[in-house]
Amino acid sequence: MINKLFKNRYFLASLQFITLAVFILLIYGAIGVTTKDPDFAKILRNTNLSNLIVWSYWWPFIIITAILFGRFWCSICPMELVTSFFGIIGLRKKPGKFLKSGWVITLLYAAILIIGIHTFAIHRIPQYMAFYMLILFAIAVIVGLIWEKRTFCTYVCPIGHLLGLYSLLSLKKLRITDSDVCKNCKTKDCISKENHYKFVGRSCTSDLYPAQLKDNRACILCGQCFKSCPHDNIAIQKQKFGTGIFTKIKLSWAEIAFFIIVSGFVIYEILSEWSVSKKIVMAFPDLINGTFHISGSFAGTIKAFALFALLPLTFYFILALIKRYFAHETWKSAFTQLVLVVLPITASMHLLKSFLKTTSRIPYWDFAISDPKGVQAADLIMKNPDLLNNDFLASVISPAISFFAIVLPVIGLLLSFYVIRKQEHTNILSKTISILAVLIYSGIFLTMLIIWRIA
């Protein structure tokens, strides 16, 4: 079924036009809705319909689909449509070495996370979210006008590395069905330069050759190769969950740095769900802010930098240092091993956070639908918190979350140990350090679960 849809000339493009229209409507629904009261913003983020959809449903949907099914979000992403269109009429310059390195993705994601979210609260103030979405749209247009092919999706999109790394775990993959067909193909329509700028049936504009795909990281599943291949030799295929991460993966430094940030972010996201564990995780950034008397929005910047960069980098660096000098691994090999063994646990907890976010926002839907701007509804809830009906959450959702809170970490932990088993290490010490990394990282979440159950 899915392969038939991908082969259809207009199915994915139609979905992209729909998501583009939704994207524009979400911006419209958030413009002009703002506040300077941080407590009011915590409620307004859920009563404003646009903000509720983007941060509590759209974003978790992207995370969930990436982990379970791969980069299918990219198949319908409006930015791919936008940047591809402007690429047709643009200057078509070749991206330079820095763009191709992947560091733009990592730095842009870090800027959004540290400055956008934890300094200016774009996830809580609807108008700031609208500005963020407009900036992202503008970047896609500008990149499309300047650089060739699909440079934005391949080298600029701020979640490119996240989707690529999580797709290593997915149950789906895009591959060729018969290698001999590709070997004997004379025209190579799937990579032909003549087809780069067709609206339908483009050759791969991510500089990939379907016959040589080894993992899911780079292919954004745009479906164009399905339509350009004259031999019907490309298909979405099934694979066992986590299979992609068991292969020999060579990560770039940009991907490694990206994941270090994400792993710190996920720890914060999960531990901040409960007051006791949040107090523990905030101890270090609070110490810094208190020592230097930092307050206001800049305190959020320091907090984010400490939790998403400084602490996780220290964790990985110490373990990589031991691998480098006592287990004789190269620096890149040491960091890559650590990233790949921690990845399944991080993904499992990111899944849990996505479930927590989407389900906990259910009581706000009545308010958001009746008052899409959300200001009046937020004011009512601010004055009377009992207006929120949490009976459904307590009776149905909470038991489900309790189940996932146990099952998901176990699955992640088992996958991590299996990755260690499959990895090639220089000696037993290197493998031991990988095991230690998994135990420490998973131990953080295990401690959280214990605190949660006690509380």
Image: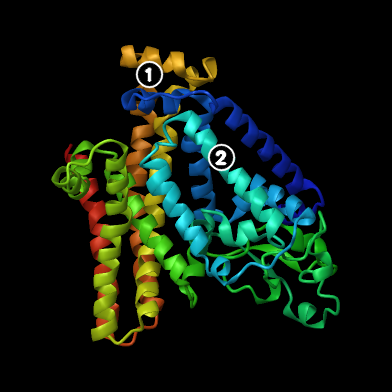
Residue at mark 1 to residue at mark 2: CA–CA distance: 31 Å
Where 225 falls versus 327 (above or below)?
above
Q: State which quadrant residue 151 falls in.
A: bottom right
Say which amino acid is labelled 1.
Asn
Q: Which residue is mark 2?
A: 133
Residue 155 place in picture, x, y as percent: 58, 62
343 left or right of 150 in image: left
Residue 73 place in picture, x, y as percent: 60, 50
Q: Which residue is mark 1?
A: 389
Where 375 falls versus 11 (above or below)?
above
Q: Nearer the viewer, residue 385 or 169?
A: 385
Residue 344 place in picture, x, y as percent: 40, 61
Q: Residue at x 45, y 23 (%)?
A: 47
Say which amino acid is labelled 2.
Met
Q: Nearer the viewer, residue 386 or 326?
A: 326
Quadrant showing the C terminus: top left
- Secondary structure type for disc 1: loop
187 left or right of 402 in image: right
Q: Which one is in front in this view, the residue at disc 1 or the one at disc 2?
A: 2
Label 1 vs 2, first from the N-terminus: 2
Report if residue 438 is visible in the image: no
Q: Nearer the viewer, residue 243 or 36?
A: 36
Report if residue 81 is visible in the image: yes
